[in-house]
Image (cartoon, rainbow, N blue to C red):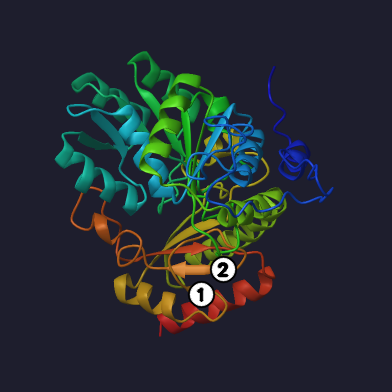
């Protein structure tokens, strides 16, 4: 049976999945079980399996069930950060000698984890433009890979990868297909439905949605792989606290509504910035998959539903100096790392989130500014970017 991924169905699951009223009090909102351990009536016989909160906690279980329901998946596992989730995934799937096909435009922290931690452990990485099926095929014809890592839209250049087509090719070669779906969120894109094996999230971003929690998650359908993840999750212990889980439960309930506003605002801003580019007013390039000029627009329109997300990247004609001045001159957009909160953020990836890829094949252009569009009034946001651009082009 195919999961209903209409925006209405997603919104209903976001609010109701795992949200049964508390059986003791009737509380509509599930309580926060702020406990490290649980009383056992008999030795080795925990109540409903609850023995220790690193291993299992009722609040975390609610978040897992809620996220799995939105994704249309059998399993979701929450972690203390996005990188903690990625670490467990990689250690569960890879062994020394394996090779990873890594997109040439990915989050700097992912590249750092692979290149600085897993490469010394004996894992090999090859960076490929995974949005280019010809480049993927060429790499597969020259080397053997255990896993392909896809971000779509990618961070920070917003490249779009055809998940279904790429997964089909990768599976022919016996590869595990992982999609980091953080930029799109489960409100807009469903990689498992398109053939991915595992979906990874930094739940810090759109799922939490309010810049007040750090978390991560892995979502999948494979029972055996989920068991491996759960074993290492418990053994290594990188789990979210009950309070962090509760904060993310609350954030996830409004995700579909927020993503609609993020997407509407971002599309309006991207179109405005593209108009400035066409007029030669300080903009070299605008990257947003909702623009028809974006090279991956048709694919994004096919595999994303309900919007194109809230992330825009823009390259300044004046180079690095103009990009820095632009990022530092906004008033409503806050200069800060991270993304996906209700408030708008702006940053310079080459010096901030992607500094770790400097000097590598994944290096980010130094005239690039990444914009996380919030849910404020779009006219106020456009006015702020206009005055910042004016300051950067004096």
The quarter of the rendered structure image containing the C terminus is bottom left
**Residue 168 at x, y percent in the picture:** 44, 19
Q: Residue furthest right?
A: 26
Count of all numbered marks drawn on residues in the image: 2
Q: Secondary structure at mark 2?
A: loop
Using the numbered discs, state the Cα–Cα distance from disc 2 to disc 1 in whole angstroms: 6 Å
Residue at point 22% right, 35% down?
126
The mark nearer the N terminus, 2 or 1, is 1
Residue 297 shown left or right of residue 139 in the figure: right
Mark 2 residue crowding within 10 angstroms, few (<14) / some (14–19) / many (20+): many
Residue 231 in the image, given as x and y percentages of width and height: 41, 31
Q: Is residue 130 visible?
A: no
Give the secondary structure at mark 1: strand
Indicate the position of residue 30 as horizontal and vertical percent values: 73, 49
Q: Which mark is residue 344?
A: 2
CB under 8 Å between discs 2 and 1: yes
Q: Is residue 275 visible?
A: yes
Residue 234, by quadrant, is top left
In this picture, residue 338 sits left or right of residue 359: right
Please report the residue visible at 20 percent of the width from the left and 34 percent of the height from the top.
123
Picture layout, residue 31 above or below residue 317: above
Q: Quadrant of the N terminus?
A: top right
Image position of 388 with respect to 111: above or below: below
Q: Nearer the viewer, residue 382 or 310?
A: 310
Q: Which residue is mark 1?
A: 334
Give the number of the disc on residue 267: none
Residue at position x 30%, y 57% from top? Answer: 364
Q: Nearer the viewer, residue 201 or 240?
A: 240
Where is residue 289 shown, x and y percent of the image?
A: 53, 47
> Badge 1: how crowded within 10 Å, few (<14), some, or many (20+)?
some
Above or below, comparing residue 358 to residue 335 in the picture: above
């Amino acid at each position: 049976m195919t999961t209903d991924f209409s925006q209405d169905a997603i919104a209903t699951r976001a609010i109701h999945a795992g949200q049964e009223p508390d059986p003791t009090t009737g509380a509509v909102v599930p309580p926060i079980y702020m406990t490290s351990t649980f009383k056992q009536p008999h030795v080795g016989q925990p109540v409903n399996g609850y023995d220790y909160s690193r291993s299992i906690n009722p609040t975390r279980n609610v978040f897992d069930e809620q996220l799995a329901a939105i994704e249309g998946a059998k399993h979701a596992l929450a972690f203390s950060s996005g990188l903690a989730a990625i670490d467990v995934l990689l250690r569960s799937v890879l062994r020394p000698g394996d090779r990873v096909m890594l997109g040439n435009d990915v989050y700097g922290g992912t590249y750092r984890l692979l290149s600085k931690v897993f490469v010394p452990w004996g894992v090999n990485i090859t960076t490929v433009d995974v949005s280019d099926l010809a480049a993927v095929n060429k790499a597969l014809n020259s080397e053997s890979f255990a896993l392909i890592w896809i971000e779509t839209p990618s961070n920070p250049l917003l490249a779009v990868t055809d998940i279904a087509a790429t997964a089909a090719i990768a599976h022919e070669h016996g590869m595990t297909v992982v999609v980091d779906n953080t930029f799109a969120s489960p409100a807009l894109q469903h990689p498992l439905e398109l053939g991915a094996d595992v979906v990874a999230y930094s739940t810090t971003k759109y799922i939490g949605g309010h810049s007040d929690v750090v978390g991560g998650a892995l979502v999948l359908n494979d029972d055996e792989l989920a068991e491996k993840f759960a074993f290492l999750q418990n053994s290594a212990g990188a789990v979210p606290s009950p309070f962090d889980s509760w904060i993310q439960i609350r954030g996830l309930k409004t995700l579909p509504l927020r993503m609609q506003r993020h997407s509407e605002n971002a599309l309006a801003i991207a179109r405005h910035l593209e108009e400035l580019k066409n007029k030669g007013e300080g903009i070299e390039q605008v990257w947003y998959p909702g623009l028809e000029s974006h090279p991956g627009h048709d694919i994004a329109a096919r595999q994303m539903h309900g919007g194109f997300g809230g992330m825009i990247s823009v390259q300044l004609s004046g180079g690095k100096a103009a990009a820095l001045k632009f990022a530092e001159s906004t008033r409503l957009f806050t200069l800060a790392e991270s993304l996906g909160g209700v408030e708008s953020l702006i940053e310079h990836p080459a010096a901030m989130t992607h500094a770790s890829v400097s000097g590598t094949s994944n290096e980010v252009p130094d005239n690039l500014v990444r914009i996380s569009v919030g849910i404020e009034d779009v006219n106020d946001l456009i006015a702020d970017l206009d005055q910042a651009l004016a300051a950067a082009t004096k």
